Structure formats: C-alpha cells, structure tokens
Image (tube, rainbow, N blue to C red):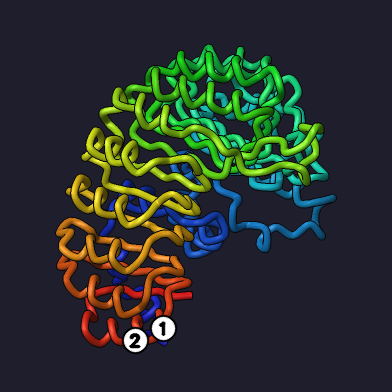
Amino acid sequence: MGQLHSRRHRFCPIDILSDDALLAIFAYLPIPDKVKAERVCQKWKHLLRHPSVWRAIDFTQIGHYLKPMYYADKQAAVLHFLQQYAGLFTKQVRLQNFASNNILQFLHSHCTQLEGIALFLHAGHTDVNLDLLSDNLTSVDLRLPISGGNGTPVGKFAEKQFNYLLHLNLHGVQITDVLCSSLSHSESLRYFMLYHCVFKSQSGSKFAALVSQLRQLNKLVLAYCWFASTQQLEEILHNVADNCCKLETFDFRFPYVPAGDDPQDIADHEIASLNFDYFLQSSVQMDRLFSVSLSGISSMTSERFTLFLQQHSGIQTLELSSCHDVDDDILYSIATNLTRLKSFQLRWCDSVTNIGLKYLAHHSSLQNLSLACNGITGKAVLTTVCTLTNIRFLSLSKVHGYKKCATTLKSLRPDIDVVFS
C-alpha cells in the first residue's frame, strides 16, 4: 500500500508551471477540453474558473458536446453554459448556430466588455433580435442564410451605429441605404468583407459614398455578391480605386448582375461583364497592396494589367481564377514585375499554356503555387517547379498528367508538399 500511495503522489512535470502559465495554456483549450480539465484536480478546477480563461468562448466545435436531453434545446444549453462561465472578462464569443434572443440579452447585460461576436443564423432562426448587440463592438461576423437575389434583411441592426468597429464580415445580408448610412459612422473600419450580399437598386451610390469615407480600410472583400446593375458595380469599384489608398488586401470574386428584366430573379443573373480597366488604371493610389484575388473578371486587357503590376510590384499574394483574359503575356508580366511574390494561385484560366508557366521558372521568392488550368501539362509543371529553389507547397488540379507529375516530384523534391485532386 505504501508503494501504491507513493506512486499516486509522485512528481508530475506540469507541476513546475506557475499558475499564470497554466492559465495561459487553459485559455487556448477548446471548450470541451476545458470542462474535462476541471475534473483533473481541485487546483485545476479552481484555475479553470478564473475569468481570464474565458475571455474567448468559441462554440464552433461544441455541437456534439451539448446535450439537449437535459435542456429544452441547444440554445438553452448554450445559455446555461454562458451563465456559468461568461462574465466581465469575456471579450470574444462565437455562437455559430446557437444564437437566441435570451443569449444575446444575457451577453448584452453581463458581458459588458464584449468586443467581438460571430453569429451564424440558419433559416429557422432569422428572427433573432440583432438590436441587442452592443454598440461598442469592434468585431462583428454576421452570416445569414442566402435567400436568392433578395438577401436577408437585418432589421434594426441596419440602424445601429458602431463607432469603434474595426472588423465587419457580412454574409447573405441585404445591403440597403439605411445600413450604408449607419456604417458611415464606423470610420475606423479596417476589415470589410461581403459574401453573397445583395445590393438593392438604390444602395449602390450609398455604398460607393460609404467606401469613400473608409479611409482606414486595409482589407476589402466583395465575393459572389448580387448588384442591381453593371453601372452600380462600376461606380463602387471607381470609389474603391479613388479613395481606399490604405488598402492592403483586395478580394473581388464573381460579381452577379441581372440578365433579364427582373433584378430579383437569381436564376436570371449572370456574371457581370464590366470595364475593369478603369479600376486597374485608377488603383495607382493603393500603394500598399500586397494581396490581390480576382475571380470571374472579364474585359481585362494585358497592357492595363501589366501597368497595374508595375505600379504594385510589392504584391506578395496573387490569385487569378476564371479570368479568361489572363494569358501567357500576363504571366510574363507577373514573373517580371512581382519580384516579391510568395503565393500564386492560377485556376481555370484556360488561355495560359506551358509557355506562360515557364516564365515563372526562375522566380526566386515563390513559395506556394496552385495550378488548375487545362492548357498546362504535368511535364511543364515538373520542369518549372524543379527550378524554383524556395517553393514549399504545390497544388495541382485539371493539369494533364498531374498525378504522374506529383509522384515524380515527391521523389525529386521531397522538400515540397504536393497536393492534388
């Protein structure tokens, strides 16, 4: 018995850590692991009840952990959990699909220092009162179900004035005049991301005016959004090019405009055929750009894009997807002008051939390369990649003979992580 007793109380290496060190470690644990760690010993249970451990509460991967059999539903389980652990020290909450009015009311009254919130509302919970969100939030991630070409109205949320907002991510939201007017008070906004949002017929000019006021904007994403007309979209792009001089990241993907008489019919929308050259020409003021993603862009001439690359030679991340005007000449311009390029994705640009790929062969700074083009062969990829001294990651798809190329590369260049699909 004496030997057994001594084994139970023998020294454990983790005991040498101070309480502050343990608190820092516990703060990074997922919620289920925090709850399990409470059962280890009384000391850990005491530490895991410290408010600093619960500054960020993320329900992203907790769905399987919540047991609605003990509660009316998962929203009730989340509310009970927040009542136990959340408080004045809580700064960030990611609710995923577990939002309810009771939960937002609790956060509003008890988590008065809350800075960021993420809400993912599915079709059955769009009646959540978003007006309960605090005006002092610095980060809002609001994802609503995509409802065709209409977008989801956000009620009184559109009237809220977030004076300290730095990060705003909207998904499936209806962009209205009221929302644009309210956001005009968020002059400190730095990261503005719109996915699958719908611009109403009169909101284009309001949004364009809003963009002109966001002088501190560092990142702008307009991805898979529906616009009332091509003219509305071009007006927005013009204001981005003329006013967002501090923009560092620009992500523009597949803009949709009406193809017929009914602007609300999503089935009758098409990818906008716009004059993108104006944006390329006017973007000279964006002298801080280091990350650019363009998808589904037409009417982009080689000469204008070459000038754009010359003006923004500091770009380190570039993605070109479904841009049918991208050809071998543009790849030559990329290899010549973007000497600091570290990551390059080229997808579904079928005008590119093996000749254009070989221009990248001696690009010394390139570390990540992703290719998915029908005009490129595996043999050309093999020849090019073997000369890239600093490349560490390669993704291949839709390239003729890419499987054989990947197998050969793994033996010739084991230092490269090759992924293919």
**Amino acid under disc 2:** Thr
Q: Residues within 10 Å of mark 2 (few under 14, many from 20)?
A: few
In this view, 199 is above or below 223: above
Residue at image point 59% right, 53% down:
60
Q: Is residue 342 left or right of residue 300?
A: left
Mark identifier at residue 344 = none
Residue 369 appears anywhere in the view? yes
Q: Is residue 381 left or right of residue 225?
A: left
* Marks 1,2: beta carbons within 8 A: yes
Residue at image point 73% right, 43% down:
146
Q: Could you say where residue 399 lies in the image, as x and y percent from the top left? A: 43, 74
In this view, 216 is above or below 38: above
Task: Describe the element under mark 2 as helix, strand or loop.
Answer: helix
**Amino acid under disc 1:** Lys
Q: Which residue is mark 2?
A: 407
Q: Residues within 10 Å of mark 1 (few under 14, many from 20)?
A: some
| Gap in angstroms between the C-alphas marked 1 and 2 | 6 Å
In this view, 286 is above or below 215: below
Quadrant housing residue 257? top right
Q: Which residue is mark 1?
A: 403
Task: Describe the element under mark 1 as helix, strand or loop.
Answer: helix
In this view, 284 is above or below 294: above
Residue at image point 69% right, 17% down:
202
Which sits in the foreground, 163 or 246?
A: 246
Q: Is the N terminus in the top left, top right, bottom left or bottom right quadrant? A: bottom left
